[in-house]
Amino acid sequence: MDERQALISFAALSQETRLAIVRLLVVAGPDGLAAGVIAERMGVSPSNVSFHLKELERSGLISQRRESRSIVYSASYETLAALLTFLMEDCCSGHPSIREGMKRSEGCCAEEDVSGGDDVLA
């Protein structure tokens, strides 16, 4: 991801409702959510959520597809991963302990240890 695209992505995420929508769609997974469901869960009007969805789609952070009579939105995991990679590109220069702290954090990428133990990063 280049700096221009990162700035567009950060600008889209710098609004409270849009950040919450992206987080909602990340949790929803690849199946995504219909625009009406997003509006309902966010507690905003359909026209308000439509405005925010257009901005997020324009930034590349989410994508849409038509399913029957609904428009379903999904997080663009590839773009989100590229944004995180952009942030971490220059990470840890001379400070490997920073990256170790990130590896210990439990996030969406944690997988349960098949031996029944604690979560470990993939």
Image (cartoon, rainbow, N blue to C red):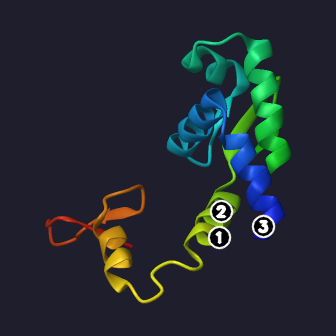
Residue for point 74% across, 44% down: 11
- Marks 3/2 in contact by CB < 8 Å: the verdict is no
Q: Give the residue type at disc 2.
A: Leu
Q: Badge 1 is on which residue?
A: 86
- Observer-nearest residue: 79 or 97? 97
Measure how far apart labels 3 and 1 are at the Cα level.
Answer: 8 Å
Disc 3 secondary structure class? helix
Q: Give the residue furthest to the bottom.
A: 94
Q: Secondary structure at mark 2?
A: helix
Tell me whether the residue at label 1 lies in contact with that at label 2, contact meaning CB atoms closer than 8 angstroms. Answer: yes
Label 2 neighbour load within 10 Å: few <14, some 14-19, many 20+: many
Left or right of residue 88: residue 1: right
Residue drawn at x 81%, y 28% as measured from the top left:
68
Place of residue 87 in the rendered image (x, y in percent of width and height, measured from the top left): 59, 67
Question: Could you tell whether 122 is left or right of 5 in the image?
Answer: left
Nearest-to-viewer mark from 3 and 2: 3
Residue type, numbered disc 1: Phe
Question: Mark 3: few, some, or many residues within 10 Å (few <14, many ≥20)?
Answer: few
Residue 60 x %, y %: 79, 51
What kind of residue is marked 3? Glu
In the rendered view, would you say 14 is above or below 102?
Answer: above
Mark on residue 3?
A: 3
Residue that appears at 73% across and 51% down: 9
Label 1 to label 2: alpha-carbon separation: 5 Å
